Image (tube, coloured by chain):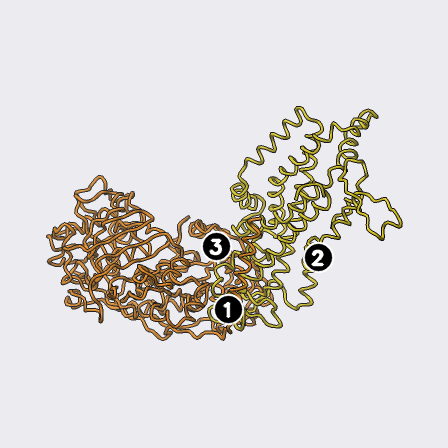
């Protein structure tokens, strides 16, 4: 994971301080460790973190390797197997048409393979979630750090913008904007490509998601900016950029990482919700939210169709949340559990 | 954490459900009869138009019949009724000039309802028609119904404020589609529109400028319901229509419920079709298709005497067909609603491309994507099988899953790039069509259209799409209400077109005129021939399927059948078992 950032944290004294845990083997050679190394050690000892982290790595590998998996599996994401459906469009055979060729069965009606569509759906979901989390965290950090450090009129303006963004109803805004944007850029006979839909979604999330990080970072910076090392840097004539990004930012990595790791699952479910409402990713691009939306009416007649995408998105979001919690514990062991 | 716990509970439930469903699906065989033949005639013997209607075996009077529906009925004012729910509801509280005697088998007879016979063509040229009104027909306040009130009802349908209803009679009387400019109802409330007259209390006379041999059929729509001028409340009549039928509306709460109770002044001896067995009929609005079907499946309490109006949703079909106990409570039948993949011939001008589309289409796959054979049956004709005189043919025989090679051959190496417009609530159908047609060498671009705007958008002459799905259900089972409406090029205007193929062929247009002038009894066969000719020579669309109605009712309901005319459950024979 992106723990490399943690390992670079300079021991400024303001970073998370952990009790040096001394075990019998370590008593022989007393080694100095950075807070990053300590956090990593704590994380490794946390079984929940390791299991959820493993699940995440597995899912990310699956998502990244989707075309390769499709080649090995022998089925494309849009390939239809309607000959394996009965006259009412329901999969033949056991549990929604599970066979050696179709591990998770087939979608009713269109007869596409559920496994390969889930792999591709995961790719869509994770890409959107990571990209959105990255963009929102970046905007949030910059806005928060500038507002917190400079104070005064800059702080007022940025806080005011944050409040406005928080006050806008996200769903209504998304419902209004997403279809309009496609109309603005594409003519009546042009197909709206999948990458465009993805970009719009990321943009929507970015426009609304940065506020919480910005507030968090601003608060942290306000408490940091009166500390001695900041005074010292200021006294030595450091420029604004140096102050913000060399002095303050390294002390903020812990909350930022935690915010990031908790934002990703939020965007996974957010994206699923938007696609559920029909304004996210459109047919035929594979997508979790739409898959779940389409499967819900089949709860009684083809539960396997509901089960596989449902359980996967559940596992994905749970793993992210657990990992995010564990990461916070590891980076900031003094915070209350 | 609450979210996670809910998710965990959901996961556990899903797991249970999966385990519970470990039985093998070996496929189904279609249960409804595919051999049924539709016939239609117009009753010539006045006895056919007299009541009472023959008893339904085992039916008894009394009880409350309920109908569960998702949304309210758009209009109840008879002059504004045009939705299917409205058309099936209106006969409960109003009577019309003519009506169809129907038992759901496809064999229908047009009989007089308020009239003694289904109309008399006075000069044999379909221009002057006379109806004699029955003796003993009454309104809910006991007043006798005369030709004057029927004429007033037709006159008020000219009011531009009373939107939503059919417009055949108005257009025919005024001899123009802009009928409200020809005759102003509001300024002439005590007069009658041109061509309509009441020589005496029992005679109603229509005089048209052009022959309209379909008038007896057109007079079966609810706009011929009578209304005394003093009971006309204008737009408010929609909430409380004045009854001339076996029931009157005693309570109407928009979007919640509508209650109909017996009208004591309705005389069964005058009515050839309605039985009015239940004492009370209640529409319950709110539950969606799934909730409605599940309530009726559960068969508890009041739902035992209920019908789920929204039918069996396709996701539940597998469950309902698999449950033998539900079989006696289900009603299935074809409807006249025909789906076609319309080809915009203004854009797709090459006949070979249109024919290739007809060869390439995988109807079986499309029906599976639509909801399966319980909801639809493939057709290769432009007329639905429920049309009088229908003949089965296939101008482009390619088998149920299409013939990709034949299509490629016709395309001769070309890869036509076509844009498919699809309403945004049925994008699976677009995915299906795209997959299907691209195998045959077409390049399909999918554009979604907001569902509520789709009808208006494809009805614009210069719309930007090459293909779109369309559906058409005629108001009476005659080719005259289908082919000229959909394919007469002289009717094309800038907006609101029904001819969405935008086909305009002089030879075919001339044929429409010729067949329309024939007596109704001779038209049936000619429409079937013309249907075949249009498909062969012009291929303006790809016929896909006719919808199948599939409904469930509670264990104490009897007598429900699917109307051969509109394809929705009919209430004329309904009865509640004690």
Mark 3 burial class by Cα count in 10 Å: few <14, some 14-19, many 20+: few
For disc 2, the marked residue is A54
In terms of secondary structure, where does tag 3 sit?
loop
Q: Which residue is mark 3?
A: B425
State the image coordinates of residue A76 (x, y, percent, origin top left). Answer: 63, 65
User: Residue B529's x, y, as percent?
Assistant: 36, 70
Q: Is the C-beta separation of discs 3 and 2 under 8 Å? A: no
Q: Most extreme residue toward the front, as rendered?
A: A24
Same chain under badges 1 and 2? The reply is: no
The residue drawn where x is 77% and y is 44% is A6
Viewer-proximal residue, A162 or A254? A254
Looking at the image, is mark 1 or mark 3 earlier in the sequence?
1
Please tell me in which quadrant of the rendered image residue B35 appears.
bottom left
Name the spot of residue B159 as percent of width and height, x first: 26, 44
Q: Find numbered disc 1 in the image and state the secondary structure of the residue it sits on.
A: loop
User: Where residue B464 sits: x, y (%)?
Assistant: 50, 51
Residue highlighted by disc 1: B21
Which shade of the palette goes to chain A?
yellow
Find the distance from the CA under tag 1 to the CA under tag 3.
29 Å
Q: Nearer the viewer, mark 1 or mark 3?
A: 1
Q: Is residue A181 above or below residue B352?
A: above
Element carrying mark 2:
helix
Please name whichever residue, B36 or A8, is drawn nearer the observer in this view of the structure: A8
The crowd level at tag 1 (other Cα within 10 Å; few <14, some 14-19, many 20+) is: some
Crowding at dot 2, Cα within 10 Å, few <14 / some 14-19 / many 20+, comes out as some
Q: Is residue A59 above or below residue B255?
A: below
Asked whether the beta carbons under mark 1 and mark 3 sit within 8 Å of each other, the answer is no
Chain B drawn in what color? orange
């Amino acid at each position: 994971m992106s723990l490399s950032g943690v390992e670079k944290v300079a021991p400024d004294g303001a970073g998370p301080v952990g009790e040096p845990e001394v075990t019998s083997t370590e008593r022989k050679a007393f080694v100095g460790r950075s807070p990053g190394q300590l956090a990593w050690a704590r994380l490794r000892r946390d079984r929940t973190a390791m299991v959820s982290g493993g699940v995440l790595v597995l899912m990310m590998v699956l998502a990244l390797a989707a075309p390769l998996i499709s080649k090995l599996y022998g089925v494309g994401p849009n390939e239809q197997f309607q000959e394996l459906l009965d006259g009412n469009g329901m999969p033949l055979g056991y549990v929604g048409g599970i066979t050696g060729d179709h591990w998770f069965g087939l979608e009713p009606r269109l007869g596409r393979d559920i496994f390969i569509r889930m792999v591709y759906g995961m790719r869509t979901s994770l890409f959107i979630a990571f990209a959105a989390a990255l963009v929102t965290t970046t905007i949030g950090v910059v806005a928060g750090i500038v507002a917190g450090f400079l104070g005064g009129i800059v702080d007022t303006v940025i806080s005011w913008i944050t409040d406005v963004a928080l006050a806008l109803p996200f769903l209504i805004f998304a419902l209004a904007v997403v279809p309009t944007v496609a109309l603005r850029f594409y003519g009546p006979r042009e197909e709206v490509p999948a990458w465009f839909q993805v970009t719009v979604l990321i943009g929507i999330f970015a426009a609304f998601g940065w506020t919480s990080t910005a507030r968090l970072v601003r608060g942290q910076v306000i408490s940091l900016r009166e500390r001695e090392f900041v005074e010292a840097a200021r006294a030595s004539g450091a420029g604004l950029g140096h102050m913000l990004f060399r002095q303050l930012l390294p002390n903020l990595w812990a909350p930022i990482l935690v915010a990031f790791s908790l934002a990703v699952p939020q965007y996974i479910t957010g994206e699923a919700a938007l696609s559920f409402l029909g304004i996210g990713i459109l047919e035929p691009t594979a997508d979790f939210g739409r898959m779940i939306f389409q499967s819900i009416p089949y709860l009684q007649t083809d539960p396997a169709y509901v089960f596989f995408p449902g359980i996967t998105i559940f596992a994905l979001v749970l793993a992210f949340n657990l990992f995010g919690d564990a990461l916070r514990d590891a980076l900031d062991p003094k915070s209350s559990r | 954490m609450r979210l996670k716990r809910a998710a965990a509970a959901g996961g556990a439930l899903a797991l249970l459900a999966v385990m519970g469903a470990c039985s093998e699906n070996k496929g189904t065989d279609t249960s409804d009869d595919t051999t049924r033949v539709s016939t239609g005639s117009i009753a010539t013997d006045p006895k056919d138009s007299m009541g009472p209607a023959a008893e339904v075996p085992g039916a008894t009077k009394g009880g409350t019949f309920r109908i569960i529906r998702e949304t309210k009925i758009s209009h109840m004012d008879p002059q504004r009724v045009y939705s299917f729910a409205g058309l099936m509801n209106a006969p409960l509280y109003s009577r019309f000039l003519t009506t169809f005697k129907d038992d759901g088998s496809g064999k229908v007879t047009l009989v007089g309802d308020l009239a003694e016979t289904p109309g008399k063509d006075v000069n044999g040229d379909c221009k002057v028609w006379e109806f004699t009104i029955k003796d003993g027909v009454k309104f809910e306040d006991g007043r006798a119904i005369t030709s004057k009130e029927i004429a007033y009802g037709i006159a008020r349908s000219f009011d531009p404020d009373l939107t939503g209803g059919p417009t055949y009679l108005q257009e025919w009387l005024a001899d123009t589609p802009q009928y409200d400019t020809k005759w102003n109802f509001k300024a002439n409330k005590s007069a009658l529109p041109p061509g309509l007259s009441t020589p005496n209390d029992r005679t109603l006379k229509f005089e048209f400028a052009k022959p309209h041999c379909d008038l007896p059929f057109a007079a079966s729509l609810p706009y011929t319901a009578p209304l005394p001028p003093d009971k006309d409340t204008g737009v408010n009549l929609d909430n409380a229509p004045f009854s001339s039928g076996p029931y009157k509306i005693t309570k109407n709460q928009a979007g919640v419920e509508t209650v109909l109770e017996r009208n004591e002044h309705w005389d069964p001896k005058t009515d050839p079709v309605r039985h009015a067995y239940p004492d009370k009929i209640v529409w319950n609005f709110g539950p969606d298709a799934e909730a409605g079907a599940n309530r009726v499946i559960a068969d508890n309490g009041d739902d035992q005497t209920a019908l789920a109006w929204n039918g069996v949703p396709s996701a539940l079909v597998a469950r309902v067909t698999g449950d033998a106990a539900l079989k006696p409570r289900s009603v299935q039948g074809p409807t006249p609603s025909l789906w076609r993949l319309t080809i915009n011939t203004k854009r797709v001008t090459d006949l070979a491309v249109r024919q290739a589309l007809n060869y390439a289409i995988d109807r079986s796959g499309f029906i599976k994507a639509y909801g399966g054979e319980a909801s639809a049956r493939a057709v290769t004709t432009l007329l639905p099988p429920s049309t009088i005189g229908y003949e089965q043919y296939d101008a482009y025989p390619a088998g149920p899953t299409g013939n990709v090679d034949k299509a490629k051959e016709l395309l001769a190496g070309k890869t036509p790039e076509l844009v498919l417009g699809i309403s945004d609530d049925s994008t699976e159908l677009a995915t299906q069509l795209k997959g299907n047609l691209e195998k045959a060498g077409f390049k399909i671009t999918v554009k979604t259209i907001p569902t509520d705007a789709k009808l208006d958008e494809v009805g614009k002459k210069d719309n930007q799409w090459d293909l779109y799905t369309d559906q058409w259900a005629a108001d009476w089972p005659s080719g005259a209400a289908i082919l000229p409406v959909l394919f007469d090029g002289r009717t094309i205007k800038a907006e609101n077109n029904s001819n969405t193929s935008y086909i305009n062929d002089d030879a075919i247009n001339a044929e429409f005129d010729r067949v329309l002038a024939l007596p109704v009894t001779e038209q049936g066969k000619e429409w079937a021939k013309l249907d075949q000719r249009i498909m062969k020579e012009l291929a303006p669309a790809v016929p896909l399927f006719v919808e199948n109605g599939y409904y469930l009712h509670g264990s104490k309901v009897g007598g429900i059948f699917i109307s051969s005319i509109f394809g929705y459950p009919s209430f004329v024979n309904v009865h509640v078992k004690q």
